[in-house]
Image (cartoon, helix red, strand yellow):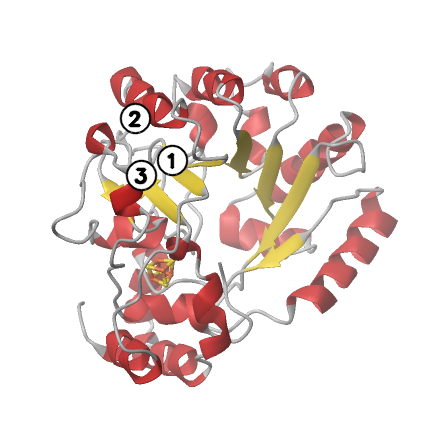
Amino acid sequence: MFSARFSEKIRARQDGPLTASGIDMLQVNVGYRCNLACKHCHVQGGADRQEAMSRETVDAVLAVLHDGRIKTVDITGGAPELNPHFRYLIEETESAGCHVVVRTNLSIFYEKGMEDLFDFYDGKHIELVASLPSCNGEHVDRVRGKGVFDKSIAALRKLNNLGYGSDRGRTLNLVYNPAGAFLPPVQSSLEATYKEELGSAFGITFNRLYTFANMPVGRFRQFLLRSGNFETYMEKLMQAFNPETLCGLMCRRLVNVAWDGRLYDCDFNQMTGLGIAEGYPAMIRDFDHDRLASRKIIVDDHCFGCTAGQGST
Ligand code: SF4
């Protein structure tokens, strides 16, 4: 897939390559297993995926956090809750004094073995980032599977009852991404629509809505290729390139670690197999904060998904 169109854009804007400007966050992908198999999933998560972070690798992550220089940990998957060491990772991350963010698909709360997940979160002050691609039930079920919308609404209500999504220090943010090969609408106006619709129909409150463009990787890339829309979508992303987004790209302030301990610049690079630049530590066990904090970032054309319009990171 590698082509130099994004690198050329960067070269036209600045002298050197894109580089990191610190590390505020460690993004931990604990595995690709998921109870859903959404059409736009960049991870291609699903029930058949076996990749899962081991206890040994979780401990290597925690060793990095105990150094005290990274303040936020973003836990993702798959459905991260399905990793057997998920709760241990959260407990220990909190004891290391880090703010914990967990990406959730919401329907996971109603899977077998997850009956006490609400109780687990009740004792925490973590930040939940929950995907909800629409306020329309049919639309959500089309993208994510039958019955997912109803479970998502039930989970959001329950989380509201626990104080998530209110001003009581428990944050609940939602994520929207388009159902097809088009760019997301302006974040602030869609957030107002979500607040109105979820509030009036279900009494649900939340803190922020993030709108992300679908990245042309993983299952969404396959869909684009199958439907003959790949080049048109890439063209759309490239046309919408906004140089103002470059300074806020998440890869400039985080390091991503995969289930097997390999390091990447972000989850999208992880899915395309583009590891950290040569000459820098490649595994979590070799983590070196000072060197990674100013590393060169590996880019490819999927990066146009992060710089289109208002930006997606
Ligand atoms: S996909 Fe986005 S976050 Fe990842 S390296 Fe490219 S610009 Fe950075």
Percent coordinates x, y for residue 172 in the rendering: 67, 39
Answer whether residue 242 is visible to the viewer in this image: no
Q: Relative to residue 74, is residue 55 drawn left or right? A: left
Residue name at image x 80 percent, y 27 percent = 161
Residue 179, compared with residue 288, is above or below; it is below
Three-letter code for the amino acid on which mark 1 is drawn? Val
Ligand 1 within 8 Å of disc 3? The answer is: no
Percent coordinates x, y for residue 167 in the rendering: 81, 37
Image quadrant of ligand 1 equals bottom left
Three-letter code for the amino acid on which mark 2 is drawn? Met
Q: Relative to residue 223, is residue 5 drawn left or right? A: left
Residue name at image x 40 percent, y 22 percent = 66
User: Pointer 3: residues within 10 angstroms few (<14), some, or many (20+)?
Assistant: some
Which residue occupies the foreground of this view, 163 or 10?
10
Depth check, mark 3 against mark 2: the one in front is 3
How many angstroms separate mark 1 from mark 3 (CA)?
16 Å
Disc 1 element: strand
Depth check, mark 2 against mark 1: the one in front is 1
Percent coordinates x, y for residue 301 in the rendering: 28, 71
Three-letter code for the amino acid on which mark 3 is drawn? His
Disc 2 element: loop
Residue name at image x 34 percent, y 44 percent = 255
Disc 3 element: helix
Ligand 1 within 8 Å of disc 2? The answer is: no
Q: Which residue is mark 3?
A: 289
Q: Which residue is mark 1?
A: 28
Ligand 1 within 8 Å of disc 1? The answer is: no
